[in-house]
């Protein structure tokens, strides 16, 4: 997967203290994007296992509440995102997940989130259903609600936050 940056601990990217994984690559093109340096689909390639390891190291150092996925566009590397969520859920089940996405929730529900570009497919785009990703988020450890703070930009925050 292509990674832009990983911040071990931040209070500016969701509720509580969170590790933040910034994906590299986005072709949505929002007007006024505040992170244009994340648009190109090239940059450091890292394995899912390496990202999991970095988050687990941050968890040793900081009292993390959760992990936030941002970018770039996490859903344009949906396969890698899903594997990352599954790995973290398995090894750090107490952490909540959140995601900032340029897609609206109704677009994600319909699967309208990937770009049908064969050259991008090698990055893991286009094979994972959106429900597979959102289901993998599990239940919010605060309120017990489904999907553990999947925000997709416009979703209501956890009522217990
Ligand atoms: S989805 Fe995010 S990274 Fe992509 S253009 Fe919109 S604001 Fe920028």
Image: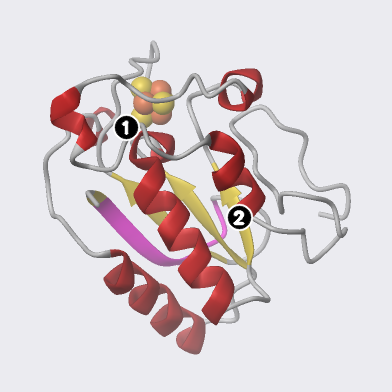
Name the element at disc 1: loop
Considering the whole magenta stretch, tell me its main secondary structure. Answer: strand
Residue bearing mark 1: 35
Residue sitting at the far bottom:
60
Q: Residue at x 50, y 70 (%)?
A: 88
Q: Residues within 10 Å of mark 2 (few under 14, many from 20)?
A: some
Res. 34 in view: no
Q: Residue at x 15, y 55 (%)?
A: 45
**Span of residues in magenta:** 4-12
In percent of width and height, residue 126 lies at 36, 31
Asked if the residue at label 1 sits under 8 Å from ligand 1, the reply is yes
- Tell me the quarter of the picture where residue 154 sits: top right
Q: Residue at x 49, y 19 (%)?
A: 112
Q: Left or right: where does residue 72 sit relative to residue 121? A: right
Work out whether mark 1 precedes mark 2 in sequence or the reverse, and give the earlier one: 1
Res. 70 in view: yes
Residue bearing mark 2: 136
- Tell me the quarter of the picture where residue 42 sits: top left
In percent of width and height, residue 71 lies at 37, 40
Residue sitting at the far top:
31
Q: Residues within 10 Å of mark 1 (few under 14, many from 20)?
A: few
Residue 7 counted in the magenta span = yes
Where 149 sits versus 155, above or below? Answer: below
Q: Left or right: where does residue 13 sit relative to residue 118? A: right
Residue sitting at the far front:
127
Name the element at disc 2: helix
């Amino acid at each position: 997967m292509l990674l832009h940056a990983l911040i071990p601990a931040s209070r500016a990217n969701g509720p509580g203290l969170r590790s933040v994984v910034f994906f590299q690559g986005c072709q949505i093109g929002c007007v006024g994007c505040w992170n244009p340096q994340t648009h190109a689909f090239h940059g450091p390639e890292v394995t899912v296992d390496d990202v999991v390891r970095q988050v687990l190291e941050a968890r040793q150092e900081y009292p993390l509440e959760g992990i936030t996925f941002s970018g770039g566009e996490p859903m344009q590397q949906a396969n890698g995102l899903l594997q990352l969520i599954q790995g973290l859920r398995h090894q750090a089940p107490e952490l909540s997940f959140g995601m900032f996405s340029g897609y609206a929730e109704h677009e994600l529900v319909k699967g309208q989130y990937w770009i049908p570009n064969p050259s991008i497919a090698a990055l893991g785009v286009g094979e994972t259903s959106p429900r597979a990703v959102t289901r993998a988020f599990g239940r919010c450890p605060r309120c017990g609600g489904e999907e553990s703070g999947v925000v997709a930009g416009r979703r209501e925050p956890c009522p217990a936050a």
